[in-house]
């Protein structure tokens, strides 16, 4: 997931995975790349303190899957600027970098197990679609995905108190998980806290915070919906019970 850096240049694109085939990477179709300076940026050029790094752009382009058999295409829009750096040959220089805000179809930050229920996959993909433009909302949708996971696992959502039906909090629902899910409770609680921060804290989450949530959510999903993981867990449980070969 570390490859999901928030910027790219025309000559250096992160190894973003194609969301169509999920097996190859994307590259820019340079013929489609278009960038233009913003109105505010143009107005600033007359300022006495103007520097090249005041320049601001908006861009649009199409990315293509490197796998010709896939032929996947992804459109993207975002912003850009000049950033100062050092060149071995020319010394100080400024280079154009671009910051994506949207991809369509959205990039998939991590692979979901094939057996992930649709209502869970939809929330996670909604989170992915917001990852580059709204980190708080991306984390909140990851939190909603947790709610859907618990519902799929038949963890109750309501309780009766004083003859009234009341919603059970996500925290308490996680605590209600059966003992066989004990190892992932801590991960689920951490994703919940990050999702809460995205909804209520007001300080704003960073892309690193959201990536942390994705890392833990990926482990949770594989523990529940990946058949290979389930088979390995069952095998390990049998060996541990016999303290040796089955």
Image (spheres, helix red, strand yellow):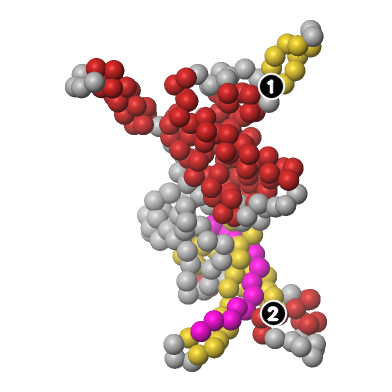
Report the residue at 24% width, 17% height from top.
Answer: 242
* Mark count: 2
In this rendering, the label closer to the viewer, 1 or 2: 1
Outermost residue toward the left in this view: 245
Instruction: Give how far across and how far down residue 107 sits, in percent.
Output: 53, 52
Q: Position of residue 244 (x, y in %)?
A: 20, 22
Up/down of 4 relative to 58, above or below: above
**Pointer 1 or 2: first along the chain:** 2
Kindly tell me whether residue 65 is visible in this rendering.
no
Residue at x-position 56% and y-position 54%: 208
Which residue is pictured at 43% across the width and 31% down the height? 223
Q: Residue at x 74, y 87 (%)?
A: 50
User: What is the magenta range?
Assistant: 74-86
Examine the image and state in which quarter residue 98 appears: bottom right
Above or below residue 85? Residue 109 is above
Label 1 to label 2, Cα distance in Å? 50 Å
Depth order, front residue of 109/205? 205
């Amino acid at each position: 997931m570390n490859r999901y850096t928030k910027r790219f240049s025309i000559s250096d694109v992160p190894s973003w995975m194609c969301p169509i085939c999920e097996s190859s990477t994307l590259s820019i179709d340079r013929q489609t790349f278009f960038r233009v300076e913003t109105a505010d940026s143009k107005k600033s050029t007359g300022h006495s303190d103007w520097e090249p790094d005041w320049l601001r752009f908006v861009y649009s382009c199409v990315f293509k899957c490197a796998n010709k058999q896939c032929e996947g295409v992804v459109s993207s829009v975002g912003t850009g600027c000049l950033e100062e750096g050092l060149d071995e040959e020319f010394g100080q220089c400024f280079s154009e970098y671009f910051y994506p805000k949207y991809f369509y179809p959205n990039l998939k930050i991590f692979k979901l197990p094939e057996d992930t229920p649709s209502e869970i996959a939809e929330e996670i993909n909604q989170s992915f679609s917001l990852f580059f433009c709204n980190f708080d909302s991306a984390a909140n949708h990851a939190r909603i995905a947790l709610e859907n996971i618990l519902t799929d696992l038949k963890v109750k959502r309501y309780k009766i108190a004083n003859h009234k039906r009341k919603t059970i909090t996500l925290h308490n629902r996680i605590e209600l998980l059966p003992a066989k899910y004990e190892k992932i409770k801590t991960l689920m609680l951490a994703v919940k806290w990050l999702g809460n921060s995205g909804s209520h804290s007001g300080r704003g989450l960073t892309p690193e915070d959201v990536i942390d949530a994705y890392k833990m959510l990926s482990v949770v999903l594989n523990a529940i919906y990946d058949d290979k993981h389930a088979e390995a867990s069952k095998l390990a449980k049998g060996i541990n019970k016999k303290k040796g070969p089955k």
